[in-house]
Image: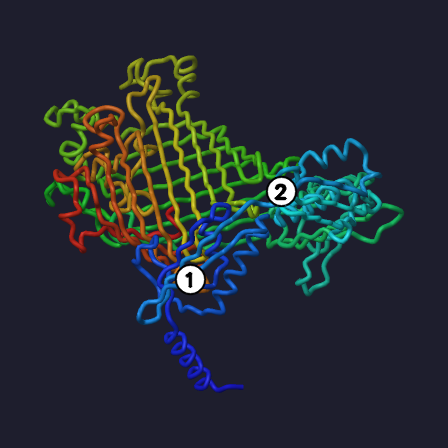
Amino acid sequence: MPSPLQAENDDAAREEQLASLPAVKSISIKGNKVLSTEEIREIMSTSTRDSFLGTGLFSGAPRPFKPEDFKKDITLIKKLYTFKGYFFADVDTTLVRNKRGDVKIDIRIKENQPTRIDSIRYSGLESVSEELQKRYFRRSRLKPQRIFSVETLIEERDRSLDFFRDYGYTFFNPDSIHITVDTLGLNAGIHFAMSLPERNAYGPTKVIVNDPLKQKKPATRTFVRDNVSVTVYGDQKFSPDIFPAAIAWEQGKLTSQSLEQRTLENFGTTNLFSSISVERDTLQAGTIPMTVRLEPAPKHLIEPKLLVDNRYGALFIGGAIAYENRNLFGAGQQFRISTNYGSQLSASTSYLSNLTSDQYDKVIPYEFSVKTNLVIPKIDRHGSYYSGTLEYSQSQLPILLKSRRELIRGTYSSQPTKNSRLNFDFFELEIVSKDSLRGFEQLFKTDLAERINIDPTDAVAVNRSLDSLLQTRLNQTFRVQYNYSNRHDASYRKKATWNLSVIAEESGGLLWLIDKYIDTSNHTGFTDSDPQIFGTSYNQYLKLDTQVAITKDLSPDRQIAARLALGWMTPYGKADDTPEDHRFYAGGSNSMRGWLFGTLGPGSCQSDATSNFGADIKTELGFEYRMKLFKLFGQPSGITLFTDAGNIWDRKGPYALTLRSIGRDFAWDWGAGLRLGSPIGPFRFDFAWKIHDPSNPRPWRISHTQLSDFTFNFGIGEAF
C-alpha cells in the first residue's frame, strides 16, 4: 500500500504529465441537424475549458488533447447516429495545431439519408382479444415510413412490457420478446415476436406494519377490513380505513403494475410511513397473493430553524421552532404548531431620509408570530385534504409603524395531476391593526401624502387619512392557487424544468353582503358609502399574481434559469384603495436584487418609505447563469451571474403604469453571487449593481457606478 507521501508524488507527476500535453483550444461541429451540438459534446471526453456562455470569462483549467480519447469520441458520434437511425452518416475531422502544439478541432458531419421502416409484423398475440389488440397498436412507437432507430425500438419494447403487465400478464418480461430487424439499403423490416404468459388475477392481500428497529417486543393488533388483512406491530394507532383505501387493486381482478405503483403513491401521500414495499407472493391457482410491508414514520417531530437575512439592509436574525404530530387521530391527521421571532441587530433609518433625527425615535424592526395548523386528509381521495389555520403575528416596521394580525383560514387542497396542485381557501378572515410611532405623522406628510392626492398642509385631510390608515380592518378572502411543476418528472424527454404558480383572490364580498343586508344600522364615524360592518372597516379588492420559472441544464455543472412574474390588483365595491399588507413589493433577495426589500418603486418614486407601502401592479423578469465549481457539505456550490428587470406601479396618480412609464421607469440590475451548498439549500450571497434606476434623475447608472456601489442580499435556496 503506497504511503501518503508516495500518493501525493504520484498525483503531482500525473498533473505535470497532463500539463505537458497540448491543450484543446476550440471544437467546431458543423453539418449536424438531427443531433444538436450540445448532444454531441455531452458524449465526448475531449472538451474545451468551460467559460461563461463561451465568452472566455470565468474559464476553468485548460483541457488536454489526447489522440486516443479523440478517436473514441468519433466512434461514439457514429454510434449515436446509428442509434438514431442514420447508419450511413459520415464524420470527418481536421486538426489544426499552433506552434505550441495546442489543437483546434473541426468536426464535419454529413448525415446522409436515414433508414426507414418499410414493414412491421407482430406475432404471438393470437390469445389477445381484438379490443385489447386495438388498444395496444393505437400507441405503437413503430409506424411505416418513419425513421428506424434503436432508440425507438427500445421504447416500443418497454411500452409493450408496460402495456401487457397492466392487463394481467404479470410475468411478461424482456426475454418474452424477440425482435428481428432485416435491413436492405435504406429500408428496415421489423418483426416483433412475443411469447405471452398466462394472465393472473390478484389473490388475498395482507398488510404488515412493523418497525424493525424497535428492540422491545411490540404489541400486536390484527384486523380485516374490506378483504384486506392488516397486522400492526407497535403502539402507534392507525385507522383501519386507511389501508383498504390506499390499495388500488381488488382481489379477483387482473393484475396491473400501474395499480401497484398507484398503491405505493397512495400510501406515500399519507405521510405515515417511512418505508413502503409491495411484494408478490407465490402463484396459487392462477392468483397472486399480495403483501404490503410498511414501516411507520416517527409520529412526533420537533424542528428548529435559524432565520437570517438582510430584508431592511442591516442583518436580521431570528429563530423558529415547530412541533408536529403526523398522526393525531390515527388517519394521517397532522397537527403543527410553530413560533418564530426575529429582530434586526440595529436600527433602520434609511427609510426616514426626509426627516431630521429629532423628528422620530429610532426603531429596531422585529417580527413575532405563532401559528397552528391541522390537516385532515380525505382517505377516499389520495392527495387531497382539508386544513385549518390559526395565526397571530405582530411586527415593528422601519417606517415607524407597529402592526398586529390575527387570521383564521380553511383550505381544501387537491392534486389534479401528479405534477400539479390546486388549493382553495374557502374561508379566510384576517384582522389587521396598526399603531404609529413618533415621527410617522411627519413621515406621512413628507413622503406619502402627495402620492394619494392629500395636501400635506391640510391638517384636517392629513388627520382623516391617518385615521383611515391606522384603523382596524377586516380582510375576508376567497383564494384559488394553482401550482404546476415537472421537477419530479423522470421522463428522459424532459428538456427543462418548469414551475408555474397562479393565485387569484377576492376579498370583501361576503362582508359586503353582511354590510348591505344584515348590518343596516348607522355607526359613528362612518357613512353609507364606507365599507364597514358593526363599526369595523373592511377591504374589498381583486388580485391576480402569477409567476413562471424555467431552468435548463447546459452541462452537469452549468445551468441557466429565467423567471417572469406579473401581478395586478384593484379595489372594488365601496373600497377606494387596496390594503398595503396585500400589495406587491419590489426589491430583495427574491426580487430585484439591486435594491433592498421594499425600496423600489412605485415607478420613479424617490422615497424608500413610499416604496415600503407597495403598489398594485408588478412586472419582473430575471435571468441567471449558474456555475457549480466545488462542493461544500457534499452539496454543489459555485458562482451565479444574474440580471433582473422590472418594477411596481400604481393604478393611477404620478406613478401609474402607462405605455410611457414602462419604457421610462423600469429598473434593471446585474450582479454576481456566491452559492454555498448545504442540506437545506444553497446559501446565497448576492452582490448587485444598478444599470437603470428610475428614481435617479440620471437613471442610466453604468458610467456612474463604482465597484463599491453594490447592494447586498442574503437568502437561502435559489431565487427561483
Image marks 1 and 2: residues in contact by CB distance under 8 Å = no
Quarter of the figure with the C terminus: top left
Dot 1 amino acid type = Ser
Q: Position of residue 19 (x, y in %)?
A: 37, 74
Residue 116: image tag: 2
Residue ID at (20%, 38%): 609
Q: In the depicted view, which residue is nearer to us: 609 or 320?
A: 609
The residue lying toward the viewer, choosing from 543 and 592, is: 592
Left or right of 360, for residue 253 = right
Decide: few, some or many residues near mark 2? Use Cα within 10 Å; few <14, some 14-19, many ≥20.
Answer: many
From the image, tell me which residue sits under label 1: 47
* Residue 249 higher or lower than 44, as above or below: above
Q: Amino acid at mark 2?
A: Arg
Could you tell me which quadrant the N terminus lies in? bottom right
Residue 471 position by quadrant: top left
Could you tell me how far apart the alpha carbons at marks 1 and 2 are, in whole angstroms? 33 Å
Label 2: which secondary element: strand
Going from the N terminus, do you reach mark 1 or mark 2 first?
Answer: 1
Judging from the image, what secondary structure is the residue with disc 1 in?
A: loop
